Image (tube, grey):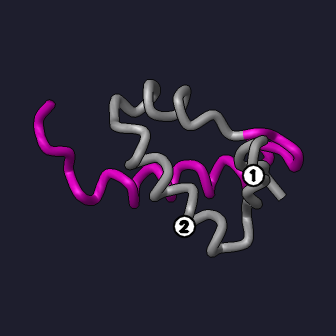
């Protein structure tokens, strides 16, 4: 697999953040790392990095054993 653009996670973060803020990803939505990775054609680790940024922004919460949920 070729190396991924290191800024890709930033673009994914911005896209997910916009979706959360405009209601396309409403509160309570569980984020699927696999689906997002497929949508963007990136590794799951890239998506996880983006989602950790969303958590730092206070937009999502991680629930062990469940996943990431939109606040």
Q: Measure how far apart labels 1 and 2 are at the Cα level.
A: 17 Å
Mark identifier at residue 53: 2
Q: Quadrant of the N terminus?
A: top left
Does 4 sit left or right of 8 as displayed?
left
In depth, the one of 36 and 48 nearer the eye is 48
Q: Is residue 42 above or below residue 64?
A: above
> Residue, x 61% and y 63% (percent of image)?
54
Residue 29 belongs to magenta span? yes
* Element on which disc 2 rests: helix
Q: In which quarter of the image is residue 21?
A: bottom right
Q: Which mark is on residue 8? A: none
Region of the chain picked out in magenta, as a range: 1-30
Q: Position of residue 25 (x, y in %)?
A: 75, 42
Q: Does the magenta segment cover residue 15?
A: yes
Disc 1 element = loop
User: Is residue 24 something that shows in the picture?
Assistant: no
**Rendered image quadrant of residue 58:** bottom right
Depth order, front residue of 20/29: 29
Can you say whether 27 is above or below 49 in the image? above
């Amino acid at each position: 697999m070729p190396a991924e653009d290191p800024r890709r996670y930033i673009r994914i973060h911005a896209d997910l953040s916009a979706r959360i803020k405009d209601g396309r990803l409403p509160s309570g939505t569980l984020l699927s790392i696999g689906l997002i990775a497929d949508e963007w054609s990136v590794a799951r680790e890239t998506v996880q990095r983006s989602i950790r940024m969303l958590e730092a922004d206070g937009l999502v919460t991680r629930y062990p054993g469940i996943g990431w949920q939109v606040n």
